[in-house]
Image (cartoon, helix red, strand yellow):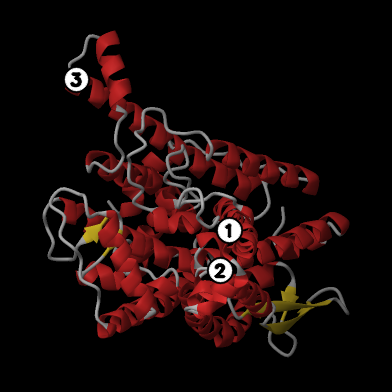
Amino acid sequence: MTFKDTIEPFLKRLPAVSRPEGHVHFKKKLGWTIGILLLYFALSNIPLFGMSAESIDLFEQYRAFFAGASGSLMLLGIGPIVTASIVLQLLVGADVIKMDMSDPQDQAIFQGAQKLLVFVMIVLESLPQILGGYILPDIGLATMLSADFNLSPAGGIDLVILIIFVQIFIGGTLVLFMDEVVSKWGIGSGVGLFIVAGVAQSIVTGLFSITRPGGPGSAPVGLLPKWLFFTTDVGLGNLFADNAFQNVFIDGGILALISTVLIFLMVVYVESTRIEIPLAHSAVRGARGRFPVKLIYASVLPMILVRALQANIQMVGLLLFNKGITIFGEFRGSTATSGLMYYLAPLNSPRDWIPSLVKQNFADINTQYANTTGFVPVDVPATWQIGVHVFADAAMLIFGGIIFALFWVETTGMNAKNTAHKIHDSGMQIPGFRRNVDSIERVMNRYIPRVTIIGGAFIGLLTLVASLLGTLGGAGGTGLLLAVSIVYRLYEDLASEQMMEMHPMMRQFLGGN
């Protein structure tokens, strides 16, 4: 039996959101989208019952584009969905699992297998955090449950751990089906919607938050309250007197503000850069159109796959380190400080690559963990090590962007063959070529593979620049890049939906139902 024959009976038993039987009105789609977004915000503010405040968030640096919220039902965010997609795309791309992604039946099996794998990934991403001692049970609650249910102290702790695991599993499952609701009944995708929500929340926090992490008398987190604090309490003269560049641009957040604005403008410009292939209707004389092949043809979602791959590598390294295996590197908290894990860790801000700031960052780590039992001070990386770290992140982003962009185009039906069939089935043709699928496919093959490679490399480079400069609110270069691109495409989807409402005959060509 083949893989498809083995897995198909299981896929038929999976719960699924039913597809609409006919056309869904634009207002109804908008309502579903807004409703799911509000539900996401509500769930991200429901804390995990029984979790100790001393728990460590393994994915703290990836929160913006994993669309999760630390210590809440949305702890895992879209992590299991993205990881399942990575695993399945690599298996199909390496021909370990043989599938013809131009076959609708194989596409359906691929989507079903990905959903099944999401449930597995929810378990694989939550259990190591719980059993590895990162998500800690509330001892007070465990003691109370032990007394109420006549359990031993260890039994009470195990019961609290089970309760936490069940909540995380429910939260991960809800994210999966919320994404499916948006994809089938709403506008765009749920994954993209949640990323935008998380990044937007981070940017608003970075602009307006009055939280003072250093206690009373320290600068607020938000850019505007921070500069008000500098003006009234510190004095601008003192700010510019010594080490002005770091005070103003790094600590003051001006570089992050400039980077945020530049990335926003750059992504909007790149999203509008495209090659337009002329089309004409084979039956309706004078009916013409254009098929756009965008520079970022595979969108920026492959960047999620790259960063998710890095996040999972870091998680494995951290778990090994806590088991006493230091061959791959050492960690302090969730930050890699040496070895292979340090080089493979993603860059997030100037503090990760400017030597003087890296030195200060490692000094802060040593200060933070100085009172920990068995603490050994970490060595500051040499300049050449910082350079290797930057080079490794650049290589992962650029080459990973190319590889995952190619996989994305193949597995989502955006390749030349599938696109040619869609254009032909809509009644359109390319002027000057024969009216058949093969002619359209040959033309598409001139552009789509090349643009996919160029776009994957370019978006990887753009992500690197954004990560080096940093962004407002700690959203991260990847998170900001994803959010801007997703919002732009959501705007295009809204325009497309409105057009199909005004001109129902456009639905067939634009892929509507």
Give the residue at mark 2.
Answer: 253
Disc 1 crowd, CA 10 A, few/some/many (<14, 14-19, 20+): many
Q: Position of residue 470 (x, y in %)?
A: 50, 71
Q: Could you give the CA–CA distance between mark 3 and mark 2, rounded to whole angstroms?
A: 48 Å
Q: Could you give the CA–CA distance between mark 2 and mark 1, rounded to whole angstroms?
A: 9 Å
**Identity, as a three-letter code, of the amino acid under mark 1:** Gly
The kind of secondary structure element at disc 2 is loop
The vertical placement of 494 against 131, above or below, is: below
Disc 3 crowd, CA 10 A, few/some/many (<14, 14-19, 20+): some
**Residue 144's disc number:** none
Q: Position of residue 440 (x, y in %)?
A: 63, 81
**Residue 206's disc number:** 1
**Identity, as a three-letter code, of the amino acid under mark 3:** Pro
Q: Position of residue 468 (x, y in %)?
A: 46, 76
The vertical placement of 287 against 195, above or below, is: below
Q: Is residue 131 left or right of residue 17?
A: left
Looking at the rendered structure, the number of numbered marks drawn on it comes to 3
**Identity, as a three-letter code, of the amino acid under mark 2:** Gly
Q: Position of residue 89 (x, y in %)?
A: 39, 63
Q: Quadrant of residue 472?
A: bottom right
Between discs 1 and 3, the one toward the N terminus: 3
Identity of the residue drawn at 50% across and 48% down: 216
Q: Quadrant of residue 146?
A: top left
Disc 2 crowd, CA 10 A, few/some/many (<14, 14-19, 20+): many
Q: Is residue 436 visible?
A: no
Q: Are marks 2 and 1 in contact (CB under 8 Å)?
A: yes
Identity of the residue drawn at 30% across and 15% down: 144
The vertical placement of 363 against 50, above or below, is: below
Q: Could you give the CA–CA distance between mark 1 and mark 3, rounded to whole angstroms?
A: 43 Å
Give the residue at mark 3.
Answer: 153
